[in-house]
């Protein structure tokens, strides 16, 4: 897998006090944009092409990175109005071949996932979408998932996860078929978590999940942003 879609079009309202004039992925961490940490982490694991779904203050992202990051190509698709996580993916996925598996990332979260392990698990289980999972340490913040012993996802409940339960880490290996493009059209606002994934599960698409022990951080939460520099410094041996 060499292509990753990065959702980078959100307004970042929860972070506005700390970073008033920038899109969330450009929030500075140790003097560097958070997005640069994502690019570097995934580039070192073999991603050669990033497709960014951008909207709010996209000029800040485009002017900083241009069309290349250390040999990896960067492409941009522009959300004329905010399209949500689902609409952003649908818009960007039109640049990917129908049968190709690709990586999907949130531009405001970091999750230390082994890409080769994720890919192998998805391929071995013929998954239409493979979720990267972690154990939640908070009540009600993350999507709750019921996962069978073989990794097959049996149910999804947004915002219902409890402490110690498996939570969605926002790193996915997927095929376009899981997006149900015949039902969910681009250029409309959709949620991956509340609209597309539940519909895909109901439609019989094969959703699986694999747990990873690595660091997870969501800089859209002010408390997480405050500790991001320390967390990413610990993870940054690869930069």
Image (cartoon, rainbow, N blue to C red):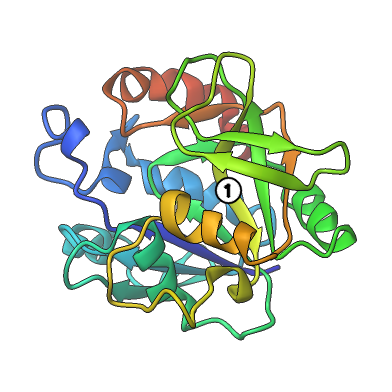
* 69 w.r.t. 130: above or below: below
Closer-to-camera residue (3/207) = 207
Assign the C terminus to one quadrant of the image. Answer: top right
Question: In what element is the residue under mark 1?
Answer: strand
In the image, what residue occupies the spot 49% across and 79% down? 181
Assign the N terminus to one quadrant of the image. Answer: bottom right
In the figure, residue 67 lies in which quadrant?
bottom left
* 230 w.r.t. 47: above or below: above
Q: Residues within 10 Å of mark 1 (few under 14, many from 20)?
A: many
In the figure, residue 3 lies in which quadrant?
bottom right
Q: Is residue 129 left or right of residue 141?
A: right
Q: Is residue 104 visible?
A: yes
Q: Is residue 98 left or right of residue 198?
A: right
Q: Is residue 221 left or right of residue 133?
A: left
In the figure, residue 34 lies in which quadrant?
top left
Q: Is residue 23 left or right of residue 136?
A: left
Q: Is residue 239 visible?
A: no
In the image, what residue occupies the spot 51% across and 35% down? 143
* 192 w.r.t. 138: above or below: below
What residue is disc 1 on?
A: 171
Q: Position of residue 205 (x, y in %)?
A: 69, 65
């Amino acid at each position: 897998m060499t292509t990753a879609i990065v959702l980078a079009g959100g307004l970042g309202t929860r972070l506005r006090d700390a970073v008033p004039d920038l899109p969330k992925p450009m929030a500075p961490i140790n003097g560097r944009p958070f997005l640069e940490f994502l690019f570097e982490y995934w580039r070192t694991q073999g991603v050669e092409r990033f497709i960014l779904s951008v909207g709010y203050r996209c000029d800040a992202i485009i002017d900083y990175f241009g069309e290349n990051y250390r040999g990896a190509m960067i492409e941009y698709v522009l959300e004329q109005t905010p399209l949500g996580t689902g609409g952003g993916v649908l818009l960007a996925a039109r640049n990917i071949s129908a049968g190709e598996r690709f990586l999907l990332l949130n531009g405001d979260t970091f999750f230390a996932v082994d890409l080769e392990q994720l890919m192998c698990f998805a391929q071995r289980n013929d998954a239409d979408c493979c979720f990267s999972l972690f154990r939640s340490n908070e009540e009600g913040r993350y999507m709750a998932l019921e996962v069978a012993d073989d990794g097959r996802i049996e149910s999804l409940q947004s915002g219902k996860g409890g402490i110690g339960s498996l939570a969605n880490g926002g790193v996915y290996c997927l095929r376009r078929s899981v997006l149900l493009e015949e039902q969910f059209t681009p250029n409309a606002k959709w949620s991956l978590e509340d609209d597309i994934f539940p519909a895909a599960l109901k439609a019989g698409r094969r959703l699986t999940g694999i747990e990873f022990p690595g660091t997870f951080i969501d800089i859209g939460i002010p408390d997480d942003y405050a500790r991001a520099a320390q967390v990413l410094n610990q993870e940054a041996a690869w930069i």
